[in-house]
């Protein structure tokens, strides 16, 4: 599989646009939370597999045997990967989920490409200092 360029980066806030909805199991009456419509911060990006790991979304339980790091063992909850097509970046300036466009910006005589919001034109690549 070829490594693809993705529209999200680590640290972006994204909205899940497709997937399971909140529902109640008809047999047991148990509430099962979905992932559609939730927002979270991107923790990891895997361009080769075209997946992202989003904080608090797609949480899975894993059985862990006792080891030096976790002497008690038991179940551990961690975030599972989502396909990148299921998420959409949220623009920090307008607060809406948006498509991404690339724009060349010149600063101090240097030109670099910046991701911008299609609807408002605000930059998604904001350098934190």
Image: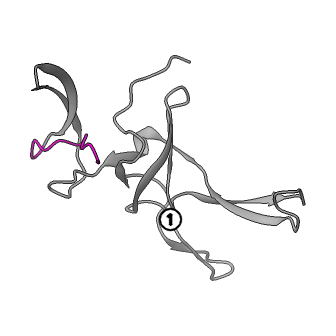
Q: Residue 53 magenta-drawn? A: no
Expressed as whole percent of the image width and height from the top left, the position of residue 124 reads 23, 43
State the residue at coordinates (39%, 25%): 5
Expressed as whole percent of the image width and height from the top left, the position of residue 45 reads 49, 38
Give the side of residue 43 with respect to residue 63, left or right.
Answer: left
> Which SS class for mark 1?
loop
Pointer 1 residue: 34
Identify the main secondary structure in magenta: loop
Q: Which residues are magenta?
A: 119-129
Q: Nearer the viewer, residue 58 or 104?
A: 104
Q: Quadrant of residue 26?
A: bottom right
Q: Quadrant of residue 27?
A: bottom right
Q: Nearer the viewer, residue 74 or 11?
A: 11
Q: Residue 125 magenta-drawn? A: yes
Please, is residue 127 above or below residue 14 in the view? above
Give the side of residue 47 with respect to residue 37, left or right.
Answer: right
Expressed as whole percent of the image width and height from the top left, the position of residue 7 reads 34, 35
């Amino acid at each position: 599989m070829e490594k693809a360029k993705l529209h999200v980066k680590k640290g972006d806030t994204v909205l899940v646009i497709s997937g399971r909805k909140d529902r109640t199991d008809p047999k047991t009456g148990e509430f099962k939370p979905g992932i559609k419509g939730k927002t979270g911060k991107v923790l990891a990006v895997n361009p080769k597999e075209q997946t992202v790991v989003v904080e608090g979304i797609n949480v899975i339980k894993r059985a862990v045997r006792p080891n030096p790091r976790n002497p008690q063992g038991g179940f551990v909850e961690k975030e599972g990967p989502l396909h990148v097509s299921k998420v959409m970046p949220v623009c920090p300036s307008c607060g809406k989920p948006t498509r991404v466009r690339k724009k060349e910006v010149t600063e101090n005589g240097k030109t670099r490409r910046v991701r911008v919001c299609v609807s408002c034109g605000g930059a998604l690549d904001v350098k934190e200092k």
